Structures are given as structure tokens and as C-alpha cells.
Image: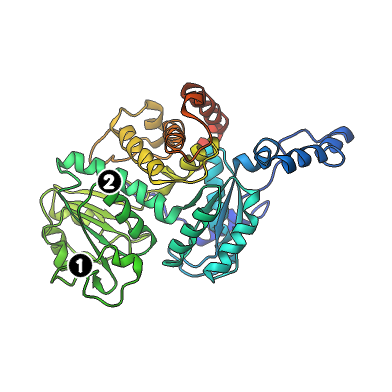
């Protein structure tokens, strides 16, 4: 087990966010602006020319404005990780942080938009009204079940990609890590018994995605126990996973389970629960900051387990940053209108594939670890530059093949696109160490 990193104090965090220029982001011009001639080009009278071109053909906005590389990170602050419903304004530090991750990992610009509105239809109308500004929309920290309705409606009514990261980013990383864990355990997805504890945004999305990948035996639990067909308190999203069983509690269904995925709250499992699972069990204890059970507790009683958490101080951190920068990078670059299941599955498969390949030595040096595909390395690390190039390419190609991009596959030069992504990697490499240190 890796040595725990030092804890972050309140004083350190507040100083980080307030010292120097307040907050974590700023806007920087991308064109020269030093002379009166530059002023005339950037604003009046020169600015009228691109305005007229866009008026004639709205697609020209992708050429003459930042729309082609601009994502809105939008929240109403109703379900901020670990904090709950803290309101729109209090969620702003999180959304700014998301903007940093987009920029540093995939060179995508972000405006964070905090909307003080809890009515889901009014929220959708606000997002629709501001959507022309952006090439894509990342929904963040919106409570369930509202988040399902909001994402579905916006995806259907807008012609730019809409992605709720709490749902799909989490589901994609879990699915990729699980495929590799099953491979190491010599088990097949369609054969295993999977228990998902939690029935919120990430749990529902994970269950749906695992079904699409072939899982056949998924049992979901919420705060009242097993999601059963004879319950009359289930919303439409939970009903998708309702099963016929006489078992009522999480502890009951955990017996002989092959896989546990925790997406609710910490400290709900004990050693006896783990003992009762099947041979070579897979335990994804993803509650943060306190997992459902700590890895060292599991390792005290069994040596045949594969464990993942949501924490960076243990192996196999299930971290959405492995997905959202790159799914948007690929989608933006081919002007995808949607992010569909084909694009999600393409990134799952590529992420799993990368983890099984030898890790470049310079990536090992960054983490000071001997990284290789094993029970302690199911998915790549965030600073692996292969993610930008290969995941973005997989997403872009899938968008084209699935028909949500205006580009035709015969016009997509994969090698040139990878060279373009390599250049983006070189532009961000100077900032590589700022997160780890």
C-alpha cells in the first residue's frame, strides 16, 4: 500500500484560492493587441466582417470565434461532491477547478456558469438561451433525478454535445477499470453478479453502461435496501433496475457477489461482508473521502481481491479526469452534435487497452512508481499523454462513424489529427508537474 499523501488544511486551501489574483482562472487574448490597428481589427470596424459571415452561415462561428474550443461548465450547486446542496454561488470554486482540468489536460477553454435555479425546466431554458456561445456543455453537480431530465432534454434540443460528467464520466472510468479487473480475475462481464450501492446519477449511469457492455446480473441498492419490483417508492430511473428477489438488504445480496460498486456513502461494509463475497471479488469502494471500506481492511482478511477507490492515495483511483477532457476534445474537433453511447464505449475500450500496454518510463518517473498492468494498476494515470492522443482520436472517429459529426470518414486523416493532438500535448507539457507537486 502506498504511503498516504499529507492532508490539505483549510488554511492552505483558502490561501491557494485567494492569494494573488482571486480565484483560479482568467481570460487571455489569443490575438495581438498592441496597436491601434490591432484595436481596429479586434473591435470596430473590423469585427463587423466576421459578424456578417456568421449571420450568413452560423457554422462560420466555429471559424471566427472561440466557440470551436469553448465548453460551458454549468451547475446549480444542488449536488456538489461531498458537500450536497450548497447553492450555485458556493459551487463556483468547483466549477473553476473543472475549468483548469479541461485546459491543462486537453487545451479546452471553459466559462464556468453557475445558475441560481432549481426548477429543471427553467434551468433548461436558461442553458438553451446561452448555448450559442459554446461548442459543448458539461453539466456538473446537479442533483438526481433532475440531472437525468435536464441532460436528456438539452441533448435532444441542442445541436452541440451535452455531457453530465457526474453520470457518464464516472460510469466510463468504472466500466473501463472493471473490464480490466474481470480480465485479471478470469471472469466475464455477462456471467458475474454485480452489486451497485447507490441509486443516484453515477449509479444509474454506471448500471446502464454496464448493461450495454453485456452485464446481465445487476442488483442495485438505495438507502432503503434492494431496488425490488415490489417496492412502490421507486422513481422511473430506479425502476429500470428493479429485480424480483426476496432479499431486502445490501448485506443479503452481497453474499456470493463477484463485484461491489459503491457510489453512495462510506463505512457501510465490514470484514464479514467481504468474506461472504465470491472468490476473487472486485471491490470498487468509491465513496469520497471515506470509502465504503478501506483497502487495508480488506487486505487483512483476503488476498484474492481487486480494489479501487475514489482517492488518490490508493491504487486504482476512479477519477473522471481520465475521461471528460478527452471526450470533449474529440467531440469538439469533429463538431459532434451529440455524445452518444458509441463514443462512450470507444473511450472505455481504448482506456482499458492503454492500461494493458507497457507504461512509458517518463510516466513512471512522474509518479515514482513501477507501473504495470496488474491488480494495482487497472487504468492509466491522469498525466499519461497517451490519453489525450488516443482517447480523443477514438472519440472523434466514433462520432464520425456513428453519424453525429458532419465530417465524413474518408475526409478524416487520423494521423494528421494525432499530430495536431501531439502539438497540444507539447503546449501543455510545461505545466505537467504543477498538480502532482
Mark found first going from the N terminus, 2 or 1: 2
Determine the CA span between mark 2 and mark 1.
24 Å
Examine the image and state in which quarter residue 350 appears. top left
Q: Please report the residue visible at 55 percent of the width from the left and 30 percent of the height from the top.
A: 424
Disc sitting over residue 213 in the figure: 2
Q: Nearer the viewer, mark 2 or mark 1?
A: 2
Q: Residue drawn at (51%, 29%), measured in percent from left and top?
A: 421
The quadrant holding residue 42 is top right
As drawn, the label of residue 413 is none
- The vertical placement of 216 against 249, above or below, is above
Q: Is residue 7 left or right of residue 66?
A: left
Residue designated by label 1: 250
* Above or below, comparing residue 22 to residue 2 in the picture: below
Asked if residue 55 can be seen in this view, the reply is: yes
Q: Position of residue 321 (x, y in %)?
A: 44, 45
Dot 1: few (<14), some (14–19), or many (≥20) neighbours within 10 Å? many
Label 2: which secondary element: helix
Q: Is residue 285 left or right of residue 92?
A: left
Whether residue 305 sits left or right of residue 139 in the image: it is left
| Secondary structure of residue under mark 1 | helix
User: Looking at this rendering, what residue extends furthest in the right direction?
Assistant: 36
Residue name at image x 54 percent, y 55 percent:
157
Is 368 in front, or is 199?
A: 199
Asked which colour scheme the image uses, the reply is: rainbow
Q: Position of residue 400 (x, y in %)?
A: 46, 34
Q: Which one is nearer the viewer's eye here, 178 or 364? A: 178
Residue 235 sits above or below residue 373 on the image: below
Residue 437 visible, this orientation: no
Q: Is residue 295 left or right of residue 56?
A: left
User: How far across and down, in percent of the image, does residue 437 sit?
Assistant: 48, 42
Q: How many marks?
A: 2
Amino acid at each position: 500500500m502506498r504511503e498516504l499523501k499529507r492532508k490539505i488544511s483549510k488554511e492552505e486551501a483558502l490561501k491557494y484560492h485567494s492569494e494573488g489574483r482571486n480565484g483560479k482562472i482568467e481570460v487571455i487574448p489569443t490575438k495581438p493587441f498592441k496597436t491601434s490597428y490591432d484595436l481596429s481589427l479586434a473591435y470596430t470596424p473590423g469585427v463587423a466582417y466576421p459578424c456578417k459571415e456568421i449571420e450568413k452561415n452560423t457554422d462560420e462561428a466555429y471559424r471566427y470565434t472561440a466557440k470551436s474550443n469553448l465548453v460551458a461548465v454549468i451547475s446549480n450547486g444542488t449536488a456538489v461532491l461531498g458537500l450536497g446542496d450548497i447553492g450555485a454561488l458556493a459551487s463556483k470554486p468547483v466549477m473553476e477547478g473543472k475549468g483548469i482540468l479541461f485546459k491543462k489536460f486537453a487545451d479546452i477553454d471553459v466559462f464556468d456558469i453557475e445558475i441560481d435555479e432549481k426548477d429543471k425546466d427553467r434551468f433548461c431554458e436558461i442553458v438553451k438561451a446561452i448555448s450559442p456561445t459554446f461548442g459543448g456543455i458539461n453539466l456538473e453537480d446537479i442533483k438526481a433525478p433532475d440531472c437525468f431530465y435536464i441532460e436528456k432534454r438539452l441533448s435532444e434540443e441542442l445541436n452541440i454535445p451535452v455531457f453530465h460528467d457526474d453520470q457518464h464520466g464516472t460510469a466510463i472510468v468504472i466500466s473501463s477499470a472493471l473490464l480490466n479487473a474481470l480480465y485479471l480475475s478470469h471472469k466475464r462481464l455477462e456471467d458475474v453478479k454485480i452489486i451497485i450501492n447507490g441509486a443516484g446519477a453515477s449509479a444509474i449511469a454506471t448500471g446502464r453502461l454496464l448493461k450495454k457492455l453485456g452485464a446481465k446480473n445487476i442488483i442495485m441498492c438505495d438507502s432503503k435496501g434492494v431496488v425490488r419490483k415490489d417496492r412502490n417508492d421507486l422513481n422511473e430511473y430506479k425502476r429500470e433496475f428493479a429485480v424480483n428477489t426476496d432479499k431486502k438488504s445490501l448485506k443479503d445480496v452481497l453474499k456470493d457477489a463477484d463485484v461491489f460498486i459503491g457510489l453512495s456513502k462510506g463505512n457501510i461494509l465490514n470484514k464479514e461482508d467481504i468474506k461472504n463475497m465470491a472468490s476473487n471479488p472486485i471491490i470498487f469502494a468509491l465513496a469520497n473521502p471515506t470509502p465504503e471500506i478501506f483497502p487495508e481492511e480488506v487486505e487483512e482478511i483476503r488476498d484474492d481481491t481487486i480494489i479501487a477507490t475514489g482517492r488518490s492515495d490508493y491504487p486504482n483511483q476512479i477519477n473522471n479526469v481520465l475521461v471528460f477532457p478527452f471526450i470533449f476534445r474529440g467531440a469538439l474537433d469533429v463538431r459532434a452534435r451529440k455524445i452518444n453511447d458509441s463514443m462512450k464505449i470507444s473511450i472505455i475500450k481504448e482506456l482499458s487497452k492503454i492500461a494493458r500496454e507497457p507504461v512509458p518510463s517518463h510516466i513512471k518517473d512522474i509518479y515514482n512508481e513501477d507501473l504495470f498492468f496488474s491488480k494495482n494498476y487497472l487504468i492509466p494515470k491522469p498525466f499519461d499523454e497517451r490519453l489525450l492522443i488516443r482517447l480523443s482520436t477514438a472519440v472523434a472517429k466514433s462520432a464520425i462513424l456513428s453519424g453525429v459529426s458532419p465530417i465524413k470518414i474518408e475526409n478524416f486523416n487520423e494521423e494528421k489529427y494525432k499530430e495536431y493532438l501531439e502539438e497540444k500535448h507539447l503546449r501543455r507539457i510545461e505545466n505537467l508537474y504543477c498538480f502532482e507537486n
